[in-house]
Amino acid sequence: VDAVISAPPDQVPIAAAQAFATVQATDFPARAEALADEIAATNPHLVGLQEVVLFRTQTPGDAALGGTEPATEVFQDFLEILLDALAARNLDYRVVVVQQAFDAEVPALIGIGPGGPQFMDVRLTDRDAILARGDVSTSDPRGANFTANLPISIGAQSLVIPRGWTSTVATVGRHTFRFVNTHLETQAAPPVQVAQAAELLSIAQADPLPVIMAGDFNSDAGGTQTATYGMLTAAGFRDVWLDAHPESPGLTCCHASDLRNETASFDQRIDLILVGDVFRTLNAGLAGGVHVTVVGDEPADRTPSGLWPSDHAG
C-alpha cells in the first residue's frame, strides 16, 4: 500500500489499480497452499499470523465521486483461504482470536468508457489472528489496538494505521501460558513503534502466567534499526533464535514485492519469538533443548508458479 499512500490525490486511483493488480498477480490462494505446507511440516500447537488481509470490492465504485458506501463484496479473505488449505490436509486448526487493525477503501481506475473514467472501490482490512491446534486447550482470548498509531493521508483522507496484538491462554501438556501475537509499526516511524512496544511490554509483564510473544516486531535483532528489540530483551524476554543458533543471523525479511525473486536476499531478522525467563527452567528439561527454524526461505518453499509463500519468512 506504500505507493497508494504516497501518491498525489489525483493519482490515487491509478496507484490503487496497480496495487490491486499486484494483489491478483501474487495469488494468495496458491500461496496459502504453501503456507499450509509450512504448518503441516511442523504441526505447531499455536500459529501467530499478521497481515491476515480481507479484500472487498465494489463495482461501480462511488469513492471517486465522494460516495461513502463501503465495499462489501469479498474478493479474498486470507484467513478463510488458509483455513480451507489446512482443512484440505486434514489439519485441525481453529481461530482463537482475530483483531482488526487498518481498514481503508480507495477508488481504483479500471477503464475509460463513453461516459469517462470507470472506477471500482477496493477495501483493505488488515487483521492479526491466532490459530490453535484442535487438541490445545485455550481460554481468555484477548485483542486490542495500540494507543499510539501512525497518522497518514491517502488522497484527501486523513487516517491512522492501527497496529495491535492478540493473545490467548493455552495449555500444552502440563504447562499453561499466555501466547501473544503482534505486529508493530515499521522502522519508518521509530517513536510510534517504540511506544507500541512499551505498551505491549506492560501488558505482558502484568500477566501472571508465563508469556510467549511472537510476531512481526519490525525491529531488527541486530540492533541497527529501532530501540524496540533491545527494550524487549532487556526486560527479560529472551530471543529463542539466539538460544538455538547463536552464530547464525536467522534473517526473515524481505522478499520482493512481486514475490518472484529467485533466491532469498534477506538483510534483517524482524520476525521474532520471545519468551519470559521462566521458560529457561522449562527448556532446560527438554531433550535437545530449544528447536527453532526459519521457514519460507528456500526455493523449494515456493508455489509451482514461483511465488514465495509470503514476503517474510516465518
Image (cartoon, rainbow, N blue to C red):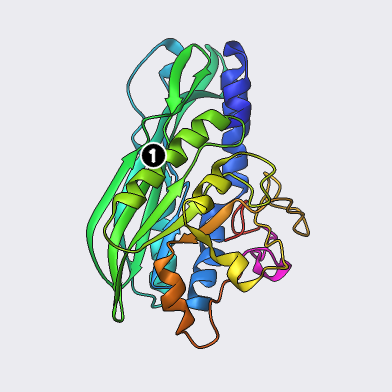
| Residue 293 left/right relative to 256 | left
150 or 200, which lies in front?
Answer: 200
Q: Residue at x 44, y 29 (%)?
A: 149
Amino acid identity at mark 1 = Glu
Q: Which span of residues is magenta-colored?
A: 296-307
Find residue 3 and report its horizontal and vertical position in percent: 63, 27
**Badge 1: residue crowd in 10 Å (few <14, some 14–19, many ≥20):** some
Quadrant position of the C terminus in the picture: bottom right
Whether residue 89 is visible, yes or no, is: no
Whether residue 281 is visible, yes or no, is: yes
Secondary element type, mark 1: helix
Dominant SS type (magenta)? loop
List the residue tagged with mark 1.
Answer: 199
Q: Is residue 74 magenta?
A: no
In the image, residue 249 sits, relative to residue 155, either above or below, namely below
- The quadrant holding residue 121 is top left
Q: Is residue 302 magenta?
A: yes
| Residue 144 left/right relative to 125 | left
Number of numbered callouts drawn: 1
| Residue 25 left/right relative to 83 | right
Find residue 234 and report its horizontal and vertical position in percent: 52, 51
Find residue 150 and report its horizontal and vertical position in percent: 48, 26
Q: Residue at x 61, y 73 (%)?
A: 244
